[in-house]
Image: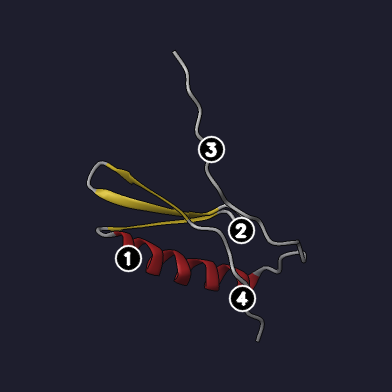
Amino acid sequence: MKTRSFTVLVYKEDDMYIAECPEVGTVDQGETIEKAIASLREATKLYLEEFSLPETSPRYVTSIEISYA
């Protein structure tokens, strides 16, 4: 069994939290951030059991600060 880390983006849409895994393309939702991530983890695991991904290098996520008018 392989173990790999993936990026998770979480945002709120109406009264639900949406969680996305950009490397795989899976998306799920939940009433809380934790539930959205748990649902995404399950959806991504099921996806990876059916389809394989090519090996890629890790992605790093950061933020930038921009001043604008």
Q: Nearer the viewer, residue 18 or 49?
A: 18
- Type of amino acid under label 4: Glu
Q: CA distance from mark 1 to mark 2?
A: 19 Å
Q: Who comes first in sequence, dot 4 or dot 1? A: 1
Crowd around label 3: few <14 · some 14–19 · many ≥20 (10 Å)? few
At numbered mark 2, what does the secondary structure look like: helix, strand or loop? loop
Query: In this figure, which residue is indicated by the disc labeled 2?
Result: 24
Tag in front: 3 or 1: 3
- Type of amino acid under label 1: Glu
At numbered mark 3, what does the secondary structure look like: helix, strand or loop? loop
Crowd around label 2: few <14 · some 14–19 · many ≥20 (10 Å)? some
Q: Is residue 20 left or right of residue 14?
A: right
Pointer 4 with pointer 2, Cβ within 8 A: no
Q: Is residue 45 above or below residue 6?
A: below
Q: What residue is at 31 percent from the left and 45 percent from the top?
A: 12
- Type of amino acid under label 2: Val
Q: CA distance from mark 3 to mark 1?
A: 26 Å
Q: Is residue 53 left or right of residue 14?
A: right
- Type of amino acid under label 3: Ile
Q: Is residue 2 left or right of residue 26?
A: right
Q: Who comes first in sequence, dot 3 or dot 1? A: 1
Q: Who comes first in sequence, dot 2 or dot 3? A: 2
Tag in front: 4 or 2: 2
Crowd around label 1: few <14 · some 14–19 · many ≥20 (10 Å)? some
Query: In this figure, which residue is indicated by the disc labeled 3?
Result: 64
Q: Is residue 64 above or below residue 17?
A: above
